[in-house]
Image (tube, grey):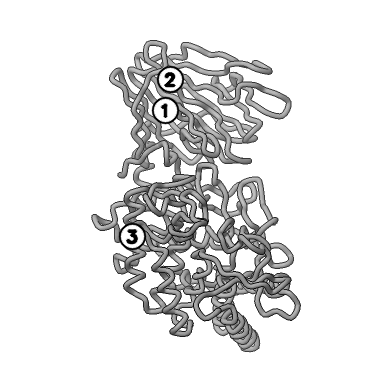
Amino acid sequence: MPAFPIREIPFSHRGSWFGISQVIGEKTHADDLHLVSHQTGMHPVLRFVPLHDGRRAHTGIVATPSLLTWQHDAGRIELAYQSADTVRVRGSGLGLRVAVAATSLTPFSGGYLYRDPVTDAHVLTSYETGRRYRITVLTGTLIGVDGVEALGSADRHLTLSAEPGWEIAIEEYETGRAPFTGPSFDGAASATADRFAAFAAAIAPWRGAATPAAELAAYVLWSATVDPAGFLVRPGVLMSKHWMDKIWSWDHCFNALALAAGEPGLAWDQFQLPFDHQDPAGALPDSITHSEVLYNFVKPPIHGWALRRLRTSLTLSTSQLSEAYARLAAWTRFWLDHRRVPGHDLPHYQHGNDSGWDNATTFDGDRVIETADLAAFLVLQLRELADLADELDRPGETRHWRETAGTVRDALLELWDGSRFVSRAAASGRLRPSGSLLDLMPIVLGEDLPAGISAALAARIAGHLTDHGLATEPVGSPEYTADGYWRGPIWAPATVLVEDGLRRAGHVDLADTIRARFLALCEKSGFAENFDAETGAGLRDRAYTWTASGYLMLAASSAGR
């Protein structure tokens, strides 16, 4: 099983809403590992402090998918998941202080620690997560208990003696449960290892020496998966179990595609999750997570592109097809009915966030603009709707969607200025070019593009290619910023979409080069939210699932799957 840096990738388990991590907030790393919950937001709950001779022990940390280990010359501490809501921790030669992360209790925040006389365990109630955390001593001795039933500011912790060895169980739950029971520590760790191995074998059966990061990519997906809770009515793959602990309404498509061949049920759940919160106008929310659904922005309509690819791996029933068709049709009508200026054939974005490329240079002039990428995605979505309507024997709707696709495609080509696509202000009609890779995204139309436009797009795309992959803004551009989010760094979704479009357009050599460089980038720098285009260094959130999914998708295609 792959070892991974705990500073970058949290230790967690499929279905769990918490992980063990040094990352306790956006770009915030603690010295000690914490139990960090993602219910009602990202909240550090418990802090783990290894002890030697009564003082904090400086340990090395080794993490694998089934076991987390603090290592020290005097001994070791090990942590393993027993289930999605329970971890086991044991130690020998080292003591452990389990401290409450919140240092004060108010009527609206903090934690309250007490001993439960029913189970003889200690329980922490957390305002931040709205959950309880029960700590049961299975073997060993508590040599310090502070802050029990304390109000206000207090140091709340339990301390376990190093000798003769000890073991505890920590459970996250709501209000009450029976006294703790479970298998042996080794049995729990072994079962977790088996569960992860089965998952990796299912979604990446082709993995081998040529794809050395595949198993770790599988772990990033597996460990970021949560059970239904809060606003998630089905299992969800969060973008991360760091601070990007949401599901945005285009990120989910890439996770669905990476899971489709081996975990078809989970894949279909990922595709459907944002549609569970579709509003009356047909719009998908910008993002969803445990306790929040945001509608202040949307995301680009890549869902027709994604569904076409998903259907090559999934066998969908007629009822599933009908539901998907109705939801996709409503989402498409949102763009046609609510995002087109009267008399215009093209829809518009209201802000860069709507495109998913929040601060791309495409939006440096007007913000409310008609763009070629949006039109191209909508053409693909309209054509997928036409095919679905045909399969469902709805000839009138088939004809309508195909005619609308043709109209939008023709209008898209009007944004071509002879050498590039430009954006157009929805209100004034003002045209503006930019250096962003976003303006080249009509390559997703593949073989449907006129040959001259296809060749010009491919040439411009090649100009974005560095030794590590596709920069979202050319490195020679005055607007290029190394850690500029969508103004320079390499991103997985842009890579996957461009690579797919190039390949379908017949630019196979360029597609192969882009694929190879992205795979090498992930093998070198992991699965960061994005990457420095010049150095290849990982940037921002360092355990991002759509990056892992992008790797798995491209590695599978490289392996001939």
Residue 328 as seen in the image, left or right of residue 443: right
Task: For marks 1 and 2, give the CA distance.
Answer: 10 Å
Q: Mark 2 points at which residue?
A: 96
Quadrant position of the N terminus in the picture: top left
Q: Do the residues labelled 1 and 2 touch (CB within 8 Å)?
A: yes
User: Dot 3, crowdedness within 10 Å: few (<14), some or many (≥20)?
Assistant: some
Residue visible at 39% across and 25% down in the picture: 90
Sequence-earlier tag: 2 or 3 = 2
Q: Is residue 330 visible?
A: no
Of tags 2 and 3, which is closer to the observer? 3
Against 504, is 112 above or below?
A: above
Q: Where is residue 320 in the image (x, y as percent from the top left)?
A: 56, 70
Q: Position of residue 38 (x, y in %)?
A: 57, 40
Task: Locate the C terminus by quadrant.
Answer: bottom left
- Residue, disc 1: 89
Residue 417 falls in image quadrant: bottom right
Callouts 2 and 3 close, C-beta under 8 Å: no
Q: Is mark 2 on a helix, strand or loop?
A: strand
Q: Looking at the image, is mark 1 or mark 3 earlier in the sequence?
A: 1
**Which residue in the structure is indicated by mark 3?**
517
